[in-house]
Amino acid sequence: MRVLITGGAGFIGSHAATLLTEKGASVCVFDSLVSGKRERVPARANFIQGDIRDRAALDAAMKGVTHVVHLAALVSVPESVRHPEETFAVNVEGTQNVFAAAHAAGAQQVVYASSAAVYGDAPELPKREDMALAPQSPYAESKVQNESDAVRMAAKGFSLMGLRFFNVYGPGQSADHAYASVVPRFIKEARAGQPLPLTGDGSQTRDFIHVSDVARAIAAALESDANGVCNIASGDATRISELIDLIRAACPVEVQVLPPRPGDILHSVADISRAKEVLHWSPTVSFPDGIRELLSV
Ligand SMILES: NC(=O)c1ccc[n+]([C@@H]2O[C@H](COP(=O)([O-])OP(=O)(O)OC[C@H]3O[C@@H](n4cnc5c(N)ncnc54)[C@H](O)[C@@H]3O)[C@@H](O)[C@H]2O)c1
């Protein structure tokens, strides 16, 4: 397997690159380093610094590639509201370039990142892949557009699998930008002895999935010839108050209760039966174990 990973210097991509090299694949990472880090790319992988908006660079990088993992994207929802054109150029046009270059290179399988954001805050739970989509931001809209572009490419007999990641967490996740995810943000505050800034009453739920399980899902999707989309999540609704309890068991800091943020999604949990059936994949890391591991290093 000769795999090109776009966004492979990022959080999820670097874990996927490590797992795939361990499995014996020949891996090349293609990343602009806009947020990714060169040092995260495993030593055994090749690295090309390039932008997915550059079709010629992608065509050159795809030569001889048999499989593609497409993760490169602008990932911040608030930034996408502020800069919708740039989000569209990278996440939609860039993805169209990746799909077209992979097809032109004769790749056998493309696995690309979608997101739980495509579901929006429709109240029906758990989220199933066949539910109506309700994107609420340019970021979410870009992921919906990726999925319809994949359907269009699949009609040409090309195999693409979209993975709708829920709340991914684990080692190497950045806490250093304004819109960092709740897990690295809270752990960073706790380590600094600062209060945990809790918006709302902590009863809101998220479906957290460990990045090692996400990397295994990517590998499983690459090895399959399955098409369509699959939720990649734990299937468990975890209250934010449970995260706080786990962190405070290790770092006894205060909690600063802030008013709920208007527009925040209250509850999110996935039905993961399709991923189990189609990809023969199941999550293995429990949320308490994953958080305790993060707190222990
Ligand atoms: N982390 C999550 O919880 C989560 C949830 C749902 C979906 N996703 C999706 O998974 C994918 C990976 O997310 P992540 O958390 O690893 O984010 P990340 O920001 O750590 O990784 C994204 C990578 O893409 C690269 N990149 C950005 N724009 C690029 C461009 N124009 N050309 C080439 N490279 C570019 C960045 O340098 C970075 O290395 C993204 O598509 C994201 O939308 C992530």
Image (cartoon, rainbow, N blue to C red):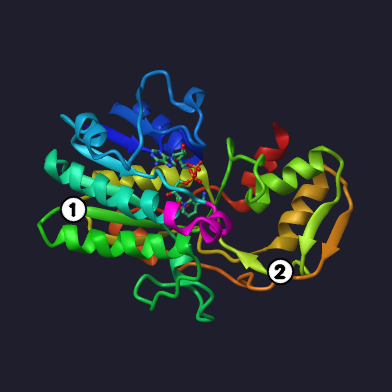
Magenta-drawn stretch contains 228: no
Helix, strand or loop for the magenta stretch, by majority: helix
Which of the two discs, 2 and 1, labels the residue nearer the N terminus?
1
Q: Does residue 222 show up?
A: yes
Q: Which residues are magenta?
A: 76-86
Q: Vertical placement of 204 versus 34: above or below?
A: below
Q: Residue at x 28, y 59 (%)?
A: 278
Q: Position of residue 20 (x, y in %)?
A: 35, 32
Q: Residue under label 1, please give it.
A: 159
In the structure shown, which secondary structural element does the residue marked by tag 2 occupy? loop
Left or right of residue 195, residue 220 in this image: left
Q: Vertical placement of 174 versus 253: above or below?
A: above
Q: Vertical placement of 254 versus 108: above or below?
A: below
Quarter of the view holding residue 174 = top right
Q: Amino acid at mark 2?
A: Arg
Q: Residue under label 2, please give it.
A: 261
Q: Does residue 23 show up?
A: no
Q: Quadrant of the N terminus?
A: top left
Q: Residue at x 34, y 75 (%)?
A: 130
Q: Is ligand 1 within 8 Å of the beta carbon of the residue shown at mark 1?
A: no
Q: Position of residue 164 (x, y in %)?
A: 41, 59
Question: CA separation, marks 2 and 1?
Answer: 40 Å
Magenta-drawn stretch contains 80: yes
